[in-house]
Image (tube, rainbow, N blue to C red):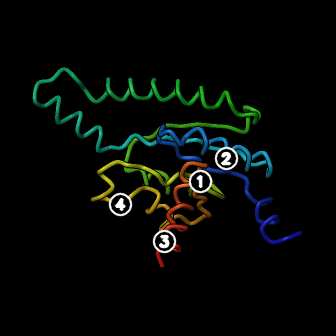
Amino acid sequence: MGGVAREMEMVKNILVPIAFSQYSRGILRYAANLASDTGANIIVVNVINERDLEAVDKISSFGYKVDVEHYLDTIKKERKAKLEEYLNDLTLPDEKVTYTFCVGDPANELLDMVVEREVDMVVMGVKNNDLKHLFTGSVAERMFRRCPVTVVSYRDEEISGKLRRRILRRKKDS
Protein backbone atom coordinates (compact mmCIF):
# COMPACT_ATOMS: atom_id res chain seq x y z
CA MET A 1 0.00 0.00 0.00
CA GLY A 2 1.36 3.44 -0.95
CA GLY A 3 2.37 6.08 1.56
CA VAL A 4 -0.51 8.43 0.82
CA ALA A 5 -3.11 5.67 1.11
CA ARG A 6 -1.58 4.56 4.41
CA GLU A 7 -1.61 8.13 5.71
CA MET A 8 -5.25 8.58 4.69
CA GLU A 9 -6.17 5.50 6.72
CA MET A 10 -4.72 7.27 9.75
CA VAL A 11 -7.10 10.22 9.34
CA LYS A 12 -9.71 9.93 12.08
CA ASN A 13 -10.97 13.51 12.47
CA ILE A 14 -11.32 16.12 9.73
CA LEU A 15 -11.99 19.74 10.69
CA VAL A 16 -14.09 21.66 8.16
CA PRO A 17 -14.24 25.40 8.81
CA ILE A 18 -16.97 27.07 6.79
CA ALA A 19 -17.76 30.75 6.40
CA PHE A 20 -21.09 30.30 4.58
CA SER A 21 -19.62 31.57 1.32
CA GLN A 22 -20.70 30.31 -2.09
CA TYR A 23 -17.98 27.64 -1.71
CA SER A 24 -19.05 26.23 1.67
CA ARG A 25 -21.34 23.54 0.30
CA GLY A 26 -18.57 22.24 -2.00
CA ILE A 27 -15.99 22.30 0.80
CA LEU A 28 -18.33 20.30 3.00
CA ARG A 29 -19.07 17.75 0.25
CA TYR A 30 -15.37 17.34 -0.49
CA ALA A 31 -14.57 16.75 3.19
CA ALA A 32 -17.48 14.32 3.51
CA ASN A 33 -16.16 12.30 0.56
CA LEU A 34 -12.72 12.14 2.20
CA ALA A 35 -14.34 11.09 5.48
CA SER A 36 -16.42 8.45 3.73
CA ASP A 37 -13.32 7.01 2.04
CA THR A 38 -11.30 6.91 5.27
CA GLY A 39 -13.99 6.27 7.90
CA ALA A 40 -13.11 9.60 9.53
CA ASN A 41 -15.41 11.90 11.47
CA ILE A 42 -15.96 15.45 10.30
CA ILE A 43 -16.15 18.38 12.66
CA VAL A 44 -17.79 21.36 10.99
CA VAL A 45 -17.05 24.70 12.61
CA ASN A 46 -18.03 28.28 12.01
CA VAL A 47 -16.12 30.95 13.86
CA ILE A 48 -17.93 34.18 14.56
CA ASN A 49 -15.23 36.80 14.39
CA GLU A 50 -14.81 38.69 17.64
CA ARG A 51 -14.21 41.87 15.62
CA ASP A 52 -17.81 41.68 14.40
CA LEU A 53 -19.00 41.62 18.01
CA GLU A 54 -16.76 44.55 18.87
CA ALA A 55 -18.35 46.51 16.01
CA VAL A 56 -21.85 45.70 17.27
CA ASP A 57 -20.84 46.75 20.78
CA LYS A 58 -19.46 50.04 19.41
CA ILE A 59 -22.70 50.71 17.50
CA SER A 60 -24.78 50.04 20.62
CA SER A 61 -22.61 52.53 22.55
CA PHE A 62 -23.93 55.22 20.18
CA GLY A 63 -27.47 54.49 21.35
CA TYR A 64 -28.62 52.16 18.59
CA LYS A 65 -30.93 49.36 19.70
CA VAL A 66 -28.65 46.45 19.01
CA ASP A 67 -26.73 44.39 21.49
CA VAL A 68 -24.04 41.75 21.22
CA GLU A 69 -26.10 38.98 22.83
CA HIS A 70 -29.07 39.47 20.48
CA TYR A 71 -26.77 39.75 17.45
CA LEU A 72 -24.95 36.56 18.46
CA ASP A 73 -28.20 34.63 18.98
CA THR A 74 -29.55 35.80 15.62
CA ILE A 75 -26.34 34.92 13.74
CA LYS A 76 -26.16 31.46 15.33
CA LYS A 77 -29.80 30.69 14.47
CA GLU A 78 -29.36 31.80 10.86
CA ARG A 79 -26.12 29.89 10.42
CA LYS A 80 -27.43 26.77 12.13
CA ALA A 81 -30.39 26.65 9.73
CA LYS A 82 -28.06 27.08 6.73
CA LEU A 83 -25.66 24.46 8.07
CA GLU A 84 -28.45 21.93 8.60
CA GLU A 85 -29.47 22.51 4.98
CA TYR A 86 -25.88 21.74 3.89
CA LEU A 87 -25.68 18.67 6.12
CA ASN A 88 -28.89 17.23 4.65
CA ASP A 89 -27.02 16.87 1.34
CA LEU A 90 -24.38 14.58 2.87
CA THR A 91 -24.56 10.80 2.89
CA LEU A 92 -22.42 10.34 6.01
CA PRO A 93 -24.08 8.76 9.05
CA ASP A 94 -25.17 11.37 11.61
CA GLU A 95 -22.77 10.00 14.23
CA LYS A 96 -19.84 10.83 11.91
CA VAL A 97 -20.70 14.55 11.75
CA THR A 98 -20.61 17.16 14.51
CA TYR A 99 -20.78 20.91 14.25
CA THR A 100 -20.02 23.80 16.49
CA PHE A 101 -19.96 27.57 16.56
CA CYS A 102 -17.37 29.57 18.43
CA VAL A 103 -16.44 33.20 18.88
CA GLY A 104 -12.95 34.65 18.63
CA ASP A 105 -10.09 35.19 16.25
CA PRO A 106 -10.86 32.66 13.48
CA ALA A 107 -7.34 31.29 12.93
CA ASN A 108 -6.60 31.00 16.65
CA GLU A 109 -9.93 29.29 17.32
CA LEU A 110 -9.32 26.79 14.51
CA LEU A 111 -5.76 26.06 15.65
CA ASP A 112 -6.99 25.50 19.22
CA MET A 113 -9.67 23.16 17.92
CA VAL A 114 -7.12 21.17 15.89
CA VAL A 115 -5.22 20.40 19.08
CA GLU A 116 -8.18 20.01 21.47
CA ARG A 117 -10.22 17.74 19.18
CA GLU A 118 -7.23 15.71 17.96
CA VAL A 119 -7.84 16.70 14.35
CA ASP A 120 -5.74 14.92 11.71
CA MET A 121 -6.62 17.08 8.69
CA VAL A 122 -8.26 20.41 7.90
CA VAL A 123 -10.24 20.94 4.69
CA MET A 124 -10.94 24.57 3.92
CA GLY A 125 -11.40 27.10 1.18
CA VAL A 126 -9.07 29.98 0.53
CA LYS A 127 -11.27 32.38 -1.42
CA ASN A 128 -12.56 35.35 0.52
CA ASN A 129 -13.03 38.87 -0.80
CA ASP A 130 -13.25 40.40 2.66
CA LEU A 131 -11.27 43.66 2.68
CA LYS A 132 -10.19 43.06 6.28
CA HIS A 133 -7.77 40.42 4.98
CA LEU A 134 -5.77 43.08 3.15
CA PHE A 135 -4.64 44.27 6.57
CA THR A 136 -4.69 41.16 8.74
CA GLY A 137 -3.91 38.25 6.40
CA SER A 138 -6.39 35.56 5.57
CA VAL A 139 -7.43 32.82 7.93
CA ALA A 140 -6.35 30.26 5.33
CA GLU A 141 -2.89 31.78 5.06
CA ARG A 142 -2.46 31.69 8.84
CA MET A 143 -3.71 28.10 8.95
CA PHE A 144 -1.26 27.01 6.24
CA ARG A 145 1.63 28.61 8.11
CA ARG A 146 0.78 27.53 11.66
CA CYS A 147 -1.35 24.38 11.57
CA PRO A 148 0.33 21.22 12.94
CA VAL A 149 -1.65 18.90 10.63
CA THR A 150 -2.28 18.65 6.89
CA VAL A 151 -4.39 21.48 5.49
CA VAL A 152 -6.19 20.72 2.24
CA SER A 153 -7.10 23.69 0.08
CA TYR A 154 -10.43 23.08 -1.66
CA ARG A 155 -10.96 24.44 -5.17
CA ASP A 156 -14.29 24.22 -6.97
CA GLU A 157 -14.49 24.00 -10.77
CA GLU A 158 -14.91 27.76 -11.18
CA ILE A 159 -11.83 28.70 -9.14
CA SER A 160 -9.81 25.86 -10.67
CA GLY A 161 -10.74 27.02 -14.17
CA LYS A 162 -9.77 30.63 -13.45
CA LEU A 163 -6.40 29.56 -12.03
CA ARG A 164 -5.71 27.27 -15.01
CA ARG A 165 -6.55 30.06 -17.47
CA ARG A 166 -4.27 32.47 -15.59
CA ILE A 167 -1.38 29.99 -15.82
CA LEU A 168 -2.00 29.39 -19.52
CA ARG A 169 -2.06 33.16 -20.18
CA ARG A 170 1.19 33.60 -18.30
CA LYS A 171 2.81 30.78 -20.28
CA LYS A 172 1.52 32.24 -23.55
CA ASP A 173 2.83 35.72 -22.66
CA SER A 174 6.31 34.39 -21.73
Q: Which of marks 1 and 2 is nearer the N terminus?
A: 2
Q: Which of marks 1 and 3 is nearer the N terminus?
A: 1
Q: Mark 2 points at which residue?
A: 30
Distance, label 3 to label 4, CA atoms, is 26 Å
User: SS of the residue at dot 1?
Assistant: loop
Looking at the rendered structure, the kind of residue marked 2 is Tyr
Residue furthest to the right = 1
Residue drawn at x 80%, y 50% as measured from the top left: 37
Q: In the rendered structure, find residue 32 and report the number of the disc placed on it.
A: none
Q: Earlier in the sequence, mark 3 or mark 4?
A: 4
- Residue 135 percent location from the top left of the image: 27, 59
157 with respect to 140 (left or right): right
Residue drawn at x 80%, y 59% as measured from the top left: 9
| Label pair 3/4, CB-CB below 8 angstroms | no
Residue closer to the observer: 131 or 92? 131
| Label pair 2/3, CB-CB below 8 angstroms | no
125 with respect to 47 (left or right): right
